[in-house]
Amino acid sequence: MLTYEPGDSVGHRVGARSKLLLQAAFAGAAFAHTDPVGLAALTGLALALLALAATPPRAVFAEYRGVLPFLAAAPAIESFRLGAPWVDPAAAVGPALAAYRTLLLLALVAAYVRTTPVRESEAAVARLVPGKPGRLLGLGVGLVFRLLPVLQADLARTREAMAVRLGDRRPLRERIRLVATAGLTRALSRTDRLAVALRARCLSWNPTPPEATFGRADALALLLAVALLAWAAWDVWPALGVGG
């Protein structure tokens, strides 16, 4: 399950703001370099970042196994034609590269979640967006990060209970209905308990954020983000006709 895991890796020592900046720079480079050569370079960088964050690739694939079929379906659907030759493999190249680029971005998201405490994510968002909107966004990020893993665990337990009771032999529509109904019921119950807990703990609209530090690991992340942005700008600048 995609949640924060305490550790002492390089990724754990980098601040939340630096990691968010690095992710944004990586996304910019991924959208600027959509060719196989550029994506191959970004793949190597993503694997290195996953290693620094103590996030094995198999954990990423396990977490996003529900998304992978949709990413794989996009190129297949794009290659279909309503007339001869019915299948155009060349048309699937662009969507396949886009799907692979999305997978790289999701891998970095997994590394971020596994190495960043929820409280630091809240403070980072609140610092990046000034005023009350930033505090509201930070609070929303914290609630999502805390509540989503609990809901995932509820759905997993529901599916396990169905399997024990031979529910996996039911028709697919019936299984979807049972899981959806149980999931919605659990979500509403969790939401009510969360509201009570927030009131009991006197949720602060403007809490004291954790101390913001900038260490050697943050400096390296910042330099890498600047390099990625420069690489992206180097490719996009001529395409915009600037200076021509």
Image (spheres, helix red, strand yellow):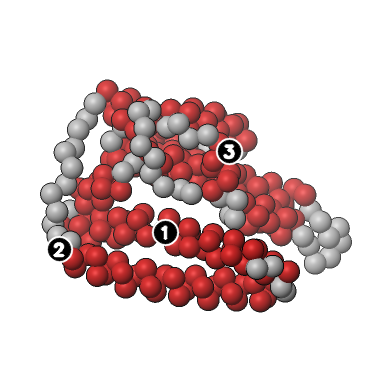
Counting from the top left corner in percent of width and height, residue 72 is at: 67, 52
Q: Residues within 10 Å of mark 2 (few under 14, many from 20)?
A: few
Structural distance between the alpha carbons of marks 3 and 2: 40 Å
Q: Secondary structure at mark 2?
A: loop
Is the C terminus in the top left, top right, bottom left or bottom right quadrant? Answer: top left
For the image shown, how many numbered marks are present on the structure? 3
Earlier sequence position, callout 2 versus callout 1: 1
Vertical placement of residue 148 versus 192, above or below: above
User: For mark 1, what is the residue?
Assistant: 150
Q: Residue at x 54, y 48 (%)?
A: 63
Counting from the top left corner in percent of width and height, residue 79 is at: 74, 56
Q: Residues within 10 Å of mark 1 (few under 14, many from 20)?
A: some
User: For mark 2, what is the residue?
Assistant: 202
Tell whether 100 sits left or right of 109: right
Q: Residues within 10 Å of mark 3 (few under 14, many from 20)?
A: few
Structural distance between the alpha carbons of marks 1 and 3: 22 Å
Earlier sequence position, callout 1 versus callout 3: 3
Question: What residue type is disc 3 on?
Answer: Arg
Counting from the top left corner in percent of width and height, residue 12 is at: 34, 33
Does the residue at mark 2 contact the one at mark 1 (Cβ under 8 Å)?
Answer: no
Q: Which mark is residue 58?
A: 3
Query: In front: 218, or 148?
Result: 148
Query: In front: 74, or 167?
Result: 167
Q: Splitting the image into 4 quarters, where does residue 189 fall?
A: bottom left
Counting from the top left corner in percent of width and height, residue 136 is at: 23, 61
Tell whether 183 sits left or right of 198: right
Query: In front: 90, or 169?
Result: 169
Q: Residue at x 65, y 47 (%)?
A: 96
Q: Residue at x 48, y 63 (%)?
A: 154
Q: Residue at x 58, y 46 (%)?
A: 62
